[in-house]
Image: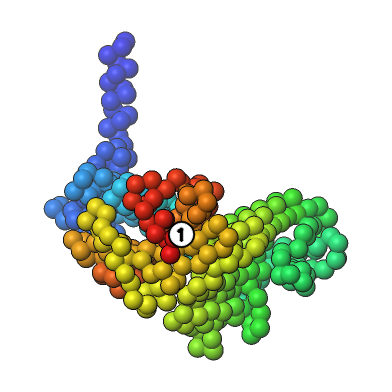
Amino acid sequence: MKSNILTTLLIILLSFPSHAGWFDSSVSSDEIINQNGLAYLKKTSEIYSGTVEDKYENGQTSFKGEYKKGLKVDEFQTFFINGQLKKSINYVKGIEDGEVLEFYEDGSIKTSYIMKNGKISDGLFKVFDKKGFVEKLEYYLNQEPQDKYESHSLIEISSRKNIDEEIWFDDNNVLKDMTFISSKTGNPFTGEYIKINYKKDGDTLIYNFKNGKLNGKGSEFNYLRKRTYRGSMKNGKDDGFFEWTEFDNTGSPKTIETGYFKQNKRHGVWILKQKEKRIKQIWKNGTKQRFDEDWEKFLQIELVRWGEIDSANIYMNLKTNRRNGEFIYFWILLDIPEKKDSTVLLYQGNCDKFNFRLLFEEIYGQPMGQNYVRRIFVNSHDDWLNANGNMNKILKHACLN
């Protein structure tokens, strides 16, 4: 009796060879060829059903997908060398159909949109930057990007104005305390709000709300579809990263201002870029500190070699130091001959308590502050360090001169 059951099961399994082959067989993309929309095995010229998988030299999967009777089906994925998903596309009988997602190497979302029967579906198309802010925003209808779209109708409670009529800032240019309700439900709005108006003098924006308050990341765009603003908010207040960009008539950036807010108050390092000029400001709880310096002036005035630390030459420029009571702001340049690069550092020191903290760091690809590479903002300004060792000597030199 048991033998008859096993025989019957074996006959059933063997009666579906193509289905079994679909799951069991696996080849690399080099082993198949696509002709007339179908995938064939190069060796046998047979229509292929099964898995296609490629790998990096380290063994991680670089690409993976399934074919059924020569057609792509289900999810096709590509991966970064670290194993993180890079792109995901869904197929139905060889045609793109479903959500398309692209990611950065750290796993954060890069692109999101929907395909239907091989064409971009009606709906939103979003591209995100590495900080998670939307840097491109479109609404598609009949495969064409639209100039106007609104996801919801929102009304500010106290003013009874529509969201695009509301004045967002008070006389001190501080974001006002506002609560928005859905005109449809009358309840405080929670979710994503999108308004697209790419007409001349129009505004396009995407914001997130929680219980009627601005909350999370937001972006705004001009009629040229260029992003003019990105920033973070918490409970209706600016809180976190902020960037505002003004463009000239040619669409090139004219002014870029970046910095950080803490509960609606500027806090930390702020940078204003205007063409070739960069102006740095230090803010603390909404008050600008007595430091407002074009950092390139530090490099333009003759630097004096202070000494050497771990094969790095230390240069200072006492003329650019700024004193404010017991505090002093001072620059140093670390020039590393062996690496043929350099770093400029901005410190705040307390000449009474004799401690310090790093405010700003800028990396250069060549010696003596040449060939700018990138800047690093240090925004956690609450950690003061005792000036020991070489830093003790550097701070003493800055405070006494």
Residue in the image at 50% along x and 54% along y: 351
Q: Residue furthest front?
A: 400
Q: Residue furthest left?
A: 43
Q: Could you say where residue 233 lies in the image, as x and y percent from the top left?
A: 64, 57
Q: Residue furthest bottom?
A: 249
Q: Could you say where residue 336 lies in the image, as x and y percent from the top left?
A: 24, 61
- In front here: 370 or 264? 370
Give residue 19's quadrant in the image.
top left
- In front here: 8 or 93? 93
Give residue 207's quadrant in the image.
bottom right
Please say whether residue 187 is visible from this viewpoint: yes
Relative to 252, is 23 above or below? above
Looking at the image, residue 101 sits to the left or right of residue 177; the answer is: left
Q: Could you say where residue 82 lies in the image, as x and y percent from the top left?
A: 30, 47
Please say whether residue 116 is visible from this viewpoint: no
The C terminus lies in which quarter of the figure? bottom left
Q: Name the residue under label 1.
A: 399
Looking at the image, residue 40 sits to the left or right of residue 186; the answer is: left
Q: Looking at numbered disc 1 in the image, what kind of residue is underneath it? A: Cys
Q: Could you say where residue 65 lies in the image, as x and y percent from the top left?
A: 33, 50
Q: Which residue lies furthest to the top in this view?
A: 1
